[in-house]
């Protein structure tokens, strides 16, 4: 997999966050491997210099080089965690070769706190099915830490960044400023997520969970309004939550209301957020668009 014996990142579920982290590490001389669910996607990744494997390859873990780093972002489904379901024993058999494992979870594991604060020591009490599945997956991964697998859990708030934010919806006229009394959400720029993952790789602390969120938890309509202001377009009208048109998944997010502490990533990993609020993050995205 890695003839040059460069550090290896093997990403299971090569999504938005994994791509940003991989680009950073590749620039530092890392070898990047990833899984893809389709041959066409795998071919595209290989064209980008990524060692792509069509999921699920039988020898993915038995062929590992020394000191591989694993990033797991594939979500659990109703049958459980797909990686552990297929590779639990292989991971244990190969654990001496694995330097770091990062599992991307969600702040949904905390459930609804009616606007109150949570940190990594707070009890996990998910309200949604999505959150409940993540709790089970987290616990299964953490159990492997007791057998020497260096697992780290990252509970991500709402992810945004280039190509994934409110600007396109506002431009299309489909954005809504949905209002639900006292509702707040946390969010994180994808580049800050990558910074946290890099810092953890440099300072492994197996068995540790980290909340990854910015410094400003706020009502969602505030973010949409600011994005419209940046574009110089009218702010979308305010829409009561009860009257808003949205998918069942989007509506489920409003069933949880909490503020999430990010003290641990600052104190233990030395993180200084590049985008401490959505204001800096949205402005940077727009400036990058305009520079193209």
Image (spheres, rainbow, N blue to C red):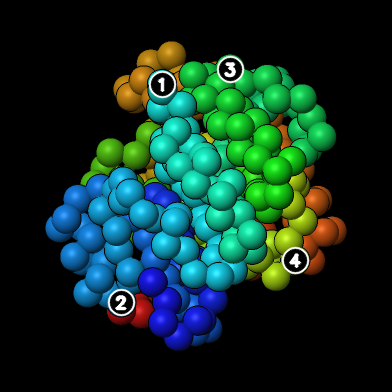
Name the residue at 45% across, 33% down: 85
Q: Where's residue 30, x and y in %?
A: 49, 78
Q: CA distance from mark 1 to mark 2?
A: 34 Å
In the displayed structure, does residue 192 sit left or right of residue 129? right
Q: CA distance from mark 2 to mark 4?
A: 27 Å
Q: Are marks 3 and 1 in contact (CB under 8 Å)?
A: no
Q: CA distance from mark 4 to mark 3?
A: 33 Å
| The label number, if any, that marks residue 127 in the structure image | 3
Quadrant location of the N terminus?
bottom left
Q: Check the image and name the residue furthest to the left.
A: 40
| The label number, if any, that marks residue 78 in the structure image | 1
Q: Where's residue 193, x and y in %?
A: 58, 58
Please tell me which residue lies in front, 269 or 94. 94
Mark closer to the chain start, 2 or 4? 2
Quadrant location of the C terminus?
bottom left
Name the residue at 77% across, 25% down: 123
Q: Crowding near pointer 2: few (<14 within 10 Å), some, many (20+)? A: few
Q: Are marks 3 and 2 in contact (CB under 8 Å)?
A: no
Residue 158 visible in the shown view: no
Of circles 3 and 1, the one toward us is 1
Residue under label 4: 203
| Residue 258 image-quadrant placement | top right
| Secondary structure under the numbered disc 3 in the rendered image | loop
**Residue 255 in the image: above or below residue 222:** above
Residue under label 2: 49
Q: CA distance from mark 3 to mark 2?
A: 41 Å
């Amino acid at each position: 997999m890695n003839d040059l014996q460069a550090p290896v990142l093997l990403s299971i579920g090569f999504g938005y966050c994994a791509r940003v982290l991989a680009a950073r590490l590749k620039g530092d001389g890392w070898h990047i491997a990833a899984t893809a669910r389709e041959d066409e996607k795998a071919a595209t990744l290989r064209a980008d210099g990524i060692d792509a494997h069509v999921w699920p390859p039988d020898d993915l873990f038995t062929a590992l080089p020394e000191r591989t780093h694993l990033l797991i972002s594939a979500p659990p489904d109703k049958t459980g965690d797909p990686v552990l379901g297929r590779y639990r024993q292989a991971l244990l058999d190969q654990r001496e070769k694995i330097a770091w494992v990062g599992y991307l979870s969600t702040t949904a594991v905390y459930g609804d706190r009616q606007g109150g604060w949570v940190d990594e020591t707070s009890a996990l009490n998910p309200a949604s099915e999505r959150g409940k599945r993540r709790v089970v997956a987290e616990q299964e991964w953490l159990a492997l830490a007791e057998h020497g697998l260096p697992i780290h859990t990252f509970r991500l708030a709402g992810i945004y960044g280039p190509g994934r934010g409110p600007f396109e919806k506002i431009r299309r006229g489909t954005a809504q400023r949905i209002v639900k009394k006292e509702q707040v959400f946390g969010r994180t720029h994808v580049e800050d997520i990558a910074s946290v993952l890099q810092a953890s790789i440099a300072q492994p602390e197996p068995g540790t969970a980290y909340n990854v969120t910015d410094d400003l938890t706020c009502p969602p309509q505030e973010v949409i309004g600011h994005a419209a202001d940046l574009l110089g377009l009218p702010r979308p009208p305010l829409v009561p939550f009860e009257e808003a048109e949205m998918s069942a998944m989007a509506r489920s997010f409003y069933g949880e209301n909490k503020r999430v502490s990010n003290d641990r990533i600052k104190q233990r990993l030395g993180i200084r957020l590049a985008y401490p609020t959505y204001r800096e993050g949205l402005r940077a995205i727009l400036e990058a668009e305009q520079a193209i």
